[in-house]
Image: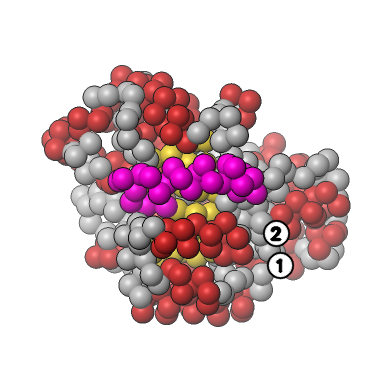
Amino acid sequence: MKFKDTFCSSPWFHMRITNQGYYNFCRWQTTKNNTLRRNIKDVTPTEYFQQDMVGIREAMKNGTPIEECGLCMEMESHGKVSGREKQLLKTGIELDNFEKTTIASPFYHEFKKVTSDILPSDWQIDLGNYCNGACVFCDPKHSSTLAGEFLKLNLISEPPSPSWCSNDVQFDEFINTIISSSSLAYLHFIGGETLITPAFKKILITLIEHDLTDVTIGFTTNLMVWDDSINALLMKFDNVNLGLSIETLSAVNDYARYPSKIENAKMILDKWVKFGKEHGWLMQIRITPTWITVEDIDSVFEYAYHSLIGVESCNYIHEPSYMRMDVLPSEFKNQAADRLEKWIKSKEKPNSTDNTVNIRNPSTVRSNIIRDAISYLSYLRRTPHDPLLIPKMIDFITTIETNRGNSILDYKPHYEKFLRPAGYRRS
């Protein structure tokens, strides 16, 4: 691989803290073995960023492929705008003009170093699993409601460990880190459901008290909450990036994002879009396509295209593996691909030579929506069906549906053709 295909500027300005207080060197990082990771209870954010990330920066400088960066590599293989491309752009680096823009980057001299004496300017902050939703593709680490349901159904033996935010010492350590960061520029919050997590409001108030309203605030909400008191705080910030989570604008969204109801979700979606446009906020619809919803994602692309707001997903879902799009047998995967391709062809084709990755540029919103749709089309056409995922998927949805009193066949009756032979018994 070429150096430009592996290098990412992210480790020089960004890091993440997960719900359980583990640090990641990147918001897109994949790491399964928590025992090898550092936690805020043991290491301060400053120590992790300035010292523990040395090895990652060294690997980036040497052009060494990093296993934890696999999700970005997969996204790029399908033409999807990757996290790596987004982070490179934040430091002024364009892949089409890599060498010149790297040398011209304001971080160029930082790239020469592997140790750091600065603090992160860009954060993803996972605030815990406090959530009023129980999305079928989510997990207990990100939803307290789902954790309760999984415990009831014996799908887990114990609840996830408490959020790092619930520990006053750890929370204060983190707060002190961000307010002392002289170059702090962007804080992106996820949960759980951000708007009902007390730590989110507390951090906003702290930033306002320290006159840090020039920091861009990003957050994602599940379209089940509207809170005027939070909105009043957000309006004090110069820039807000709003993520709106929905899978489809069809009824199957009720199954995927249980217990949300599509009519209520549409109402809150429209309300957020109107409110966000009134205040000049940057908005993206956040989707996590699975085998359950991929057939209907054109409805989201159409809404976004019409509303001139972006569509963004962090990556292709990998966990839980039985929710991946390649669970679908080829016949159904091709049906979904055909429907998506029809939608793409109904729109003006973006310039094939335009490799703009700035999804936040209003002038390229529609071309980026189409590019994202094309990436899912590529995934559906090129990724083979994995039949080994089906038995676990059947076991899971049968268990969860028995508790919820619903059935995927209520929403996708034609899926009976592959579900029944695989052992699905719900009516």
Q: Main secondary structure of the magenta part?
A: helix
Residue that carries the numbered disc 1 in the rendered image: 259
Residue span colored magenta: 164-187
Q: Residue at x 48, y 63 (%)?
A: 205
Q: Position of residue 53 (x, y in %)?
A: 42, 27
Dividing the picture into quadrants, the one containing residue 235 is bottom left
Q: Indicate the amino acid at tag 2.
A: Ala
Of residue 55 and residue 342, the one placed in the foreground of this image is: 55
Residue at image position (52%, 42%) is 173
Q: Secondary structure at mark 1?
A: loop
Q: Which mark is residue 134?
A: 2
The location of residue 388, given as percent across then percent down, is: 69, 36
Q: Residues within 10 Å of mark 2 (few under 14, many from 20)?
A: many
Picture quarter with the C terminus: bottom right
State which quarter of the image contains the N terminus: top left
Locate residue 103, reporting x and y percent.
15, 33
- Tell which of 3 and 23 is nearer to you: 23
Q: Is residue 192 visible?
A: yes
The label number, if any, that marks residue 187 in the structure image: none
Earlier sequence position, callout 2 versus callout 1: 2
Residue at the spot x=46%, y=58% of the render? 206
Secondary structure beneath label 2: loop
